[in-house]
Amino acid sequence: MPTYGPPSLQLVRGEGVWLWDRDGRRYLDLLSGLAVTSLGHSHPAVADALYAQAQTLLHVSNLFGTEPGWQVAQTLDRLLGVGQPGWPAAGGMRGQVFFANSGAEANECALKLARRFGGRGRHVVVSAFNSFHGRTLATLHATGQPAKHEAFQPLPEGFRHVAWQDLDALEAALDPSVAAVLLEPVQGEGGVNPASAAYFQGVRRLCDERGILFMVDEVQTGLGRCGSWFAHQHLGVVPDVVTMAKALGNGVPIGACWAKTEVAAVFAPGDHATTYGGQPLAAAAARAVLAVMEAEDVPARAQRAGQRLTRGVTALAGVKEVRGLGLLLAVELDGHDAPGVAARLLADGVIVNAITPTALRLAPSLLINDEELDVALVALTEVLT
């Protein structure tokens, strides 16, 4: 179906930060499949894990438990505690995880959890304008971009949008029908717009005062991308629900919705389900991904590489601003058309995308090295000057 338009390339192979098309031409991938391949393409640890798991146990229903899924849940619970105020760096389970197949499905789980938590008549989820939470009907309405809603009316009832980073507007929207607030710590698809710590801490306070859930969408920002294990850890809050996906499988479809134990407990058997979510093959990939991420300390690598990339790009003529966290960056251009610049970079063998008409998004592998960053800076210099 023509939902993406005609493809600009046919890619046949990937290794690290590099991709090759069918004519053998090489491309530097500064997009990572939209922040998915955070360990680079064809990482050997992930490939080996997939091969070994496929020879061991490919699938059972979620009526049964499997070791890879249990181990991934334990690791995510520990990483969500790292750096959180009042939470030790290691310990037992403080939350519970539902595995899905994608970020949208992880957010669907969070939305149903909010309705179950709020109860009948207290079901509204408040999110921000310019947010992005998915393309299913419910997550599309949670997404604060009205232009994306028009073709699909009527959308499911129970969503309300407020101005981004406006705490007064949010407070005014919290009437007794509200069950939860859903926010991204960095609005990724909306233009790479980071939240301030003061805003997130204010949201946490309001949610506590009203007895409603604070749900954080970390589908794009989680798992080291922003220089911490989860981007909300920069902001001094502990959310009630955290969703994640893209980097978790490094290209193998898997998402997860984590919730505090007392919040997860509102679900009863039959309230939610998935056939493939968290099946052994996907969970084995995620287990390998998390092991490599911890061994490589990807949050620290993302911080260092992000600072180097930001310094280099900020110094270029034709760049008005570089914003973002870690290795999720937007390059705001001065006098350049972003889709046109992205097309010229592609012609020169560099993959980025235009996140707005005036800004490029950079989200390379978290394992990108200095030499590869220098290649990126040379290419950007040649196109922008």
Image: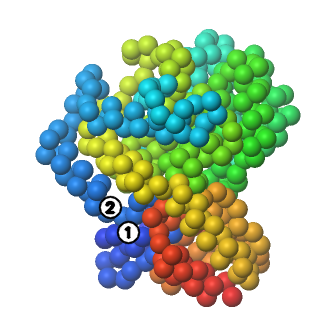
Quarter of the rendering containing residue 353: bottom right
For the C terminus, the quadrant is bottom right
Q: How many marks are shown on the rendered structure?
A: 2
Q: Determine the residue positioned at 48% across, 77% down.
A: 372
Residue 234, image x, y percentages: 66, 46
Q: CA distance from mark 2 to mark 1?
A: 7 Å
Name, please, the residue furthest toward the left: 55
Category of crowding for the residue at label 2, using alpha-carbon neighbours closer than 10 angstroms: few (below 14), some (14–19), many (at least 20) = some
Vertical relation: 67 (above or below) 9: above
* Residue closer to the observer: 271 or 260: 260
The residue pinned by badge 1 equals: 16
Q: Determine the residue positioned at 34% across, 69% down.
A: 14
**Residue 243 left/right relative to 66:** right
* Residue closer to the observer: 100 or 157: 100
Residue 84, image x, y percentages: 61, 36
Q: Determine the residue positioned at 72% across, 25% down.
A: 207
Which mark is drawn over residue 39? none
Q: Earlier in the sequence, mark 2 or mark 1?
A: 1
One can see residue 140 in this view:
no
Vertical relation: 231 (above or below) 62: below
**Amino acid at circle 2:** His
Secondary structure category for the residue under label 2 = loop
Quarter of the rendering containing residue 165: top right
Residues marked 2 and 1 touching at CB (< 8 Å): no
**Amino acid at circle 1:** Gly
Vertical relation: 20 (above or below) 278: below
The residue pinned by badge 2 equals: 43
